[in-house]
Image: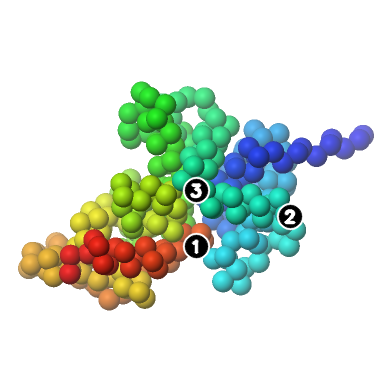
Amino acid sequence: MAKAPPVKWTREHFLIALNLYCKLPFGKLHKGNPIIIEAAEKMGRTPNSLAMKLCNFAALDPVQQARGIRGLPGATKQDRAMWNEFHTNLSTLGTESEELLHDLFTKDETKEVDFLSHDKVRLVAPSGPTETQATVKVRRGQQFFRQAVLTAYEVRCCISGINVPRLLVASHIKPWGKFPAERLNPRNGLCLSTLHDAAFDAGLITLDDKLNVVLSKRLRRFFPQPTLEQNFVPFEGHPIRLPEKLAEPDGDFLRYHRNEVFQS
């Protein structure tokens, strides 16, 4: 029996694969992963084809390269071109890839695609309104950013280690409102508990150039409060838990936070 001809890697398939790469841990980029199996089937591809493409991307990931992880050596010029285009234009292509991924799994605009369990696809209700196309696009971008950042940090607060997804936030280092070009950049994100996210946004905590937690004098004015101190003091001077890939916080972004947001 003749083998079926290979399915062409279209631009849409590349964007879906790049989205998946941002959300799946390195150890899950294999053909036996149920998410890869389901996504490949819906794309009309084999799980092996999709898994190999994801491993090709790992070979292009500078964070993986710095750790000595090389991925597969078969990355093509097209792989490299799409990788560079995607990460140069995350503010638009992150949203576009999320819309393609959403439509691959469901046409229900009241649901978003969730991969945080790493081994199954869930359809979850969005947290915001869905009335307008603009709102849907914003929500898709937020969904991409949240999933990419939380996955990179293994769904754990990088300060406290809390790993309850509903208590975690993909926190922006440079504020969402002021820096639209960096809104979907995983390197502009930290996985924080809702408490530490609020403190970070308010400038009550920051990270130094070695990624150690720093508390502000303004926060210390509220001491002594045992519960407050328990949630911050034990982490002071200790480094955050580093992300697995892609989302290692940008030093320039953290410098901005220390200089412009932190209430020293």
Question: Is disc 3 placed on a helix, strand or loop?
Answer: helix
Left or right, 227 with reference to 14: left
Q: Mark 3 points at which residue?
A: 90
Pinpoint residue 233: horizontal percent, then vertical percent. 20, 71
Pinpoint residue 188: horizontal percent, then vertical percent. 40, 57
Mark 1 or mark 3: which comes first in sequence?
A: 3
Instruction: Decide which of 241, 256 is in the foreground and name it.
Output: 256
Splitting the image into 4 quarters, where does residue 241 fall? bottom left
Mark 2 or mark 3: which comes first in sequence?
A: 2
Pinpoint residue 174: horizontal percent, then vertical percent. 33, 56
Question: Is disc 1 placed on a helix, strand or loop?
Answer: loop
- Residue 260 visible within the image: yes
Amino acid on which disc 2 is placed? Thr
Amino acid on which disc 1 is placed? Glu
Question: Is disc 2 placed on a helix, strand or loop?
Answer: loop
Q: Is residue 109 above or below residue 119?
A: above
Quarter of the image containing the C terminus? bottom left
Residue located at (91% from left, 35% from top): 2
Amino acid on which disc 3 is placed? Leu
Q: Please tell me whether mark 1 or mark 3 is closer to you in this view.
A: 3
Left or right, 174 with reference to 16: left
Left or right, 87 with reference to 235: right
Q: Mark 2 points at which residue?
A: 76
Mark 1 or mark 2: which comes first in sequence?
A: 2
Q: Mark 1 points at which residue?
A: 244
Q: In this view, does 100 lie above or below 116?
A: above
> For mark 2, does the 10 Å Cα neighbourhood hold few (<14), some (14 to 19), or many (20 or more) residues?
few
Residue located at (37% from left, 31% from top): 135
